[in-house]
Image (spheres, coloured by chain):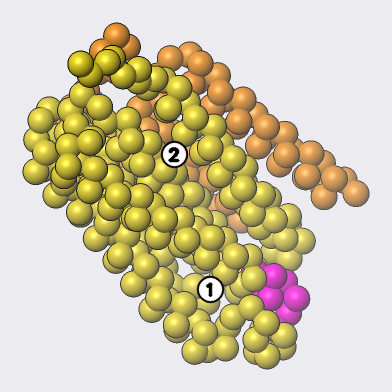
Amino acid sequence: MSEEHAHIVPYKTFMGIWIALLILTGVTVWVAQYNLGPLNIWVALSIATLKSALVVAVFMHMKYESWLFKIALLSALAILAIFIGLTFFDVLYR
Amino acid sequence: MSGHVHKDYTGAKFGMWLFLFTEVLLFGGLFILYSVYLARYPKEFITAGKELNVWFGGGNTLVLLTSSLFVAVSITALRRGAKKLCLGLLGGTIACAAIFMINKYFEWSAKIHHGIYPGSAHLKELQPGEMVFFNIYYLTTGLHGIHVVIGGLVLAWAMLLIKSDRINADDWVILENAGLYWHLVDLIWIFIFPLYYLILH
């Protein structure tokens, strides 16, 4: 096999990420009990973003992929951000 | 005799990622729909959101996070030559998919029993904002549920290929891509859970 293969991710790393994901889920549920006004949605979205970053980086091996994959991912996220941004520019300032 | 079979791992994985980006944009559109209507009907969304059961949503979150762990570990197991462990973990993932759908069945049954489903007479009596909430809820979680079923089927297919050694320690890209699809299902739920089940409590 001529192609270079990404290294094998150890079991321990995956277990660590799983525990982190469970703790973050607990934190989301706990914070949601308090009424922080509009802040609630931003806290929830921040934790969800952090959780997805862990899943993408380790479970989906993005951390170990080449720059090509990382730039492609950032481009896709940038496109999504533009969609959301332009939509709210219209919705909020109409 | 047997010629060199060219395997383009990078190409295969990159193709899968491109497909996943289209999925992200698909669900991204549904999340935009949610956020625009949340901005328009904040009070109605809170009233409607209280109808959702945090235990169903939270339980299914734990099921999906654990299933994602199983898939990730299964690839390491396969590459280390632990074929039985790999198959066991994938079986566990498919069991998680089944548990998720059974939970969803009970959750939706209870809602439908209370007359909450798209186009129901009860929904038409509610405030427009509440109706919108439940319609987007059914659309988003329904589309996600279809993804769970497809993901389970793809993993079952991967298990058959592992049994017949067509996926093995030297050639595992199909399992890798099937796993990527499963992680995406988990990723989308990571956002659905707080947005629909928690934010409004």
Residue with the most extreme front position: B1
| Viewer-side residue, B116 vs B55 | B116
Q: Quickly name the residue at label 1.
A: B50
What's the residue type where badge 2 is placed? Ser
Residue with the most extreme right position: A94
Q: Quickly name the residue at label 2.
A: A52
Q: Which residue: 24% across, 60% down?
A: B95
| Viewer-side residue, B9 vs B118 | B9
- Vertical placement of B123 versus B131: above or below? below
Residue A74 visible in the displayed image:
yes
Query: Is B132 inside the magenta-drawn segment?
Result: yes
Q: Which chain is orange?
A: A
| Viewer-side residue, B168 vs B95 | B168
Give the residues drawn in magenta, as a range. B126-133
Most frequent secondary structure within the magenta stretch: helix
Residue A4 visible in the displayed image:
no
x, y percent for residue B164: 17, 42
Q: How many residues crowd around disc 1 within 10 Å: few (fewer than 14), some, or many (20 or more)?
A: some
Q: Which chain is yellow?
A: B
Q: Which residue: 57% across, 69% down?
A: B138
* Chain of the residue on which disc 1 is drawn: B
x, y percent for residue B174: 33, 35
